[in-house]
Amino acid sequence: MRNFQHVILGTGQATGTLLGDLLPTGDSIAVIEGDRVGGTCVNTGCTPTKALVASAKVAHMVRRAPEYGIQPNGVEIDFDTVRARMNAIRDNTAMVSWISSAENVSLIEEWGRFEGPRQIRVGDEVITADRIYINGGARPRVPDIPGLETVPWLDNGRVLELTEVPEHLIILGGSYIALEFSQIFRRFGARVTVIERGPQLVFREDADVAESIKDILELEGIEFCLDSSVVRVDPDAAGLAVTIAQGGEERLLTGSHLLVAVGRVPNSDLLNAEAAGIQLDERGFIEVDDFCRTSAEGVFALGDINGHGAFTHTSVNDAEIVLDQMRGGTRKLSDRIPVYALFIDPALGRVGMTEKEAIAKGHNVLKATKPMSTINRAKEMGETLGFAKLLVDGDTDQILGAAILGPGGDEIVNMFAVYMHSGLPCSTYRKSVLIHPTISELMPWMLDTLEPV
């Protein structure tokens, strides 16, 4: 039975952050991975999907070229080249080489499962550790739909292995993964239908944001079925048939491919967490305190599996909090301001609270909105869809949240994230001098139009 000073279970993005600090110490480290090294982000998440988003945007802009006075010779999608570019970008051999070349690290390419407190079985061996960092991630949720097992349905991983553009892609789910793939494949030439059981897309967002996203995607020809539940799925001559219930009536949709994107579940059920004394919550996430410590002594949980964020940047921040705590620091989860993006085009950048959250928490909410169509830089780029929304607490003069749906929204929102973290009042932000002509230069000016909600 080998003992290590540190064992990292899983190789998502928090692992790289941990290793960056732990490797120079010379401590003995074991890294356990039963799937592909790199986790979701590198293999089936951020990296490959954003590569596809980039290719799809080029196709879209070529089609729009006449608006800019450019006459193209048409658009032809070379999907083999699109896939080759994506696969080259998501190649994770560098991380494998980095881990394997470190003298004080053992990369164990097996699935890990607890057998007792700080004891993990990997293959035929049981290893022990002084400190264990669980970075086991999450996987697509499989809904209980009659007949789903009778068709070759896709998840966010399998859809990346397609070798041709679907003729008609039906997508179950109306949130981030679903919408990004809907636009990608629509721009590649597929017919796309999105089925969402709720009354709006991206249900966590405010209604005005969700409606604007829907309008943008509908302009590109994506079809939506809201307030629709799936009754069953069957094989069909066209590929598959999905029966949905909508407005009290049943409706049959036929398509060539089916993508299921209805959320994700933590991989905690694969760990035998009970044997290690690790508590899970009612949704299966590992319970942690403000420093990512689990109920088991010396065991930490980071990333998607702890339920405190399902993003690469939150996973990395979890690792930073753990490392800071090891050094006697005070960084903690509860200090983190939520920030994230929906990478459709134009992108949605979000930070802090939504309008409905701020109202529910009793804030004296002031709001300002600005359509992209009123911003000169957006007009110059021909990117006038979407809007910006800023929320401020009327009592404290602090920014409560922001939503930027428009060109560069995923980048502009970072400015608000930094400002909110600083704790400076809006009156100071209003004095900022920003570059003209840009989208972001108009953000301080929005403060002049704040009104009570």
Image (cartoon, grey):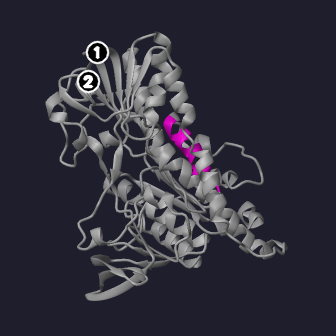
Residue 212 lies within the magenta run: no
Residue 393 left/right relative to 346 = left
Q: Amino acid at mark 1?
A: Arg
Q: Residue at x 52, y 72 (%)?
A: 166
Q: Which residue is mark 1?
A: 2
Q: Amino acid at mark 2?
A: Glu
Position of the C terminus, as image quadrant, is bottom left
Residue 399, visible in the rendered structure: no
The span shown in magenta is 408-421
For marks 2 and 1, give the CA distance: 8 Å
Q: Is residue 196 above or below residue 15?
A: below
Q: What is the x, y in percent for residue 126?
A: 24, 23
Position of the N terminus, as image quadrant, is top left
For the residue carrying disc 2, how many other residues have a C-alpha within 10 Å: few (<14), some (14-19), or many (20+)? few
SS type, badge 2: strand
Q: Which residue is mark 2?
A: 125
Q: Nearer the viewer, residue 356 or 17?
A: 17
Q: What is the x, y in percent for residue 256?
A: 45, 77
Residue 323 left/right relative to 183 = left
Specify the farthest residue to the top: 26
Residue 417 lies within the magenta run: yes
Q: Residue at x 48, y 65 (%)?
A: 179
Residue 368, visible in the rendered structure: yes
Q: Is residue 351 above or below residue 423?
A: below
| Image quadrant where residue 187 sits | bottom right
Q: Nearer the viewer, residue 263 or 323?
A: 263
Q: Looking at the image, tell me whether mark 2 or mark 1 is earlier in sequence order.
A: 1
Q: Nearer the viewer, residue 284 or 233?
A: 233
Q: Residue at x 84, y 75 (%)?
A: 71
